Amino acid sequence: MKVVHLKYPHQLNVTQEFTTAYSLAVGFFDGVHKGHQAVIQSAKEMAKRLNIESAVMTFDPHPSIVLGGRREKVFYITPLQQKLDVLENFGVENVFVVHFTSDFAKLSPEDFIQYFIKDLNVKHISAGFDFSFGQFGKGNMETMQTLSNGEYGVTVIDKQSDQEEKISSTRIRRYLQDGDMESAAKLLGRAFEVPGIVIHGDKRGRTIGFPTANIQSMEGSFIPATGVYAVKILVQNKWHDGVCNVGYKPTFKNPEDKQLSIEVHILDFNKNIYGEEVKVGWYKRIRSEKKFDGIESLKVQIEKDKNEAIEYFTAYS
């Protein structure tokens, strides 16, 4: 998959760079959920029909950072690199990543169409019914059609719903905040995943018979509600079942220590994986995080958590 980073004004020789014709899916696509997948599938099908290449246009960073003057950190269901990985798995041939800046946000709908659609040799556009573009979101899918002047076709994807409610990134974030991994997975079309690296922790788990891999999540990743989860972890290209604790380890730490940790006890696994890139897939929340009276009561509970995770994966394997 080819990835092209664009900015406005883009310093490209358009006639040389973009001789290939594209069927383009356009949107922010955080999460690449089932609603987004319908848009992307439309672009892929049209590419095949027109015998041109499929492409996706996405934006980075999130528009709210630029438009809303947002100072707090934005957490993504799929940070950019993870989004690119998911798109590649879907068989997308090209991705245009547009750097979202204040200058870009001031583009008129007409200029957006000229510089980021026509100049890129886009022959067909697929987007959701509520996609907007140009300064103040003045452009919509009707505008997209009107401004085409016959140079490209347009497919508008209707609202995609689940249980009579729109499938959306906002809805998925709500489920993640509640620890409802099954509902999130239903809208994503796959388990929610967080990429990261295994780092050194305090190594306390091994002293009580439950060694854990401490995960430093990818920058900008959305982390689910604190608690204990049945998870799978991808290590060295192989998935393993596990139990994950997300939280602040209240049994051992001062309540004022707000350093969130992600620890995975990998079942039937004893390799040294420090420094390894991993991916955690979240399947079911087992319980809330709690403070225990001592080590023994904690060990008893971890054993229960482990058995519940085993039962879950046995039932759904």
Image: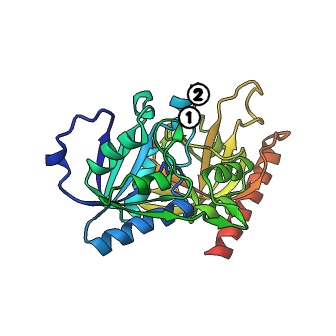
Query: Mark on residue 261?
Result: none
Residue 241 appears left or right of 297: left
**Quadrant of the frame with the N terminus:** bottom left
Residue picked out by circle 2: 70
Residue at image position (72%, 37%) is: 249
Evaluate whether residue 91 shows in this view: yes
- In the picture as drawn, the residue positioned furthest to the right comes out as 293
Q: Nearer the viewer, residue 271 or 258?
A: 258
Secondary structure type for disc 1: helix
Q: CA distance from mark 2 to mark 1?
A: 6 Å
**Quadrant of the frame with the C terminus:** bottom right
Residue 308 picture location, percent across and down: 74, 64
Contact check, label 2 and label 1, Cβ < 8 Å: yes
Residue 230 picture location, percent across and down: 66, 59
Residue 37 appears left or right of 178: left
In the picture, residue 116 is in which quadrant?
A: top left
Residue 301 picture location, percent across and down: 79, 53
Q: Nearer the viewer, residue 163 or 12?
A: 12
- Mark 1 is surrounded, within 10 Å at the Cα level, by few (under 14), some (14 to 19) or many (20 or more) other residues, namely few
Residue at image position (77%, 35%) is: 250
Check disc 1 and give the amino acid type. Answer: Ser
Residue 125 picture location, percent across and down: 39, 59
Residue picked out by circle 1: 64
In the picture, residue 44 is in which quadrant?
A: bottom left
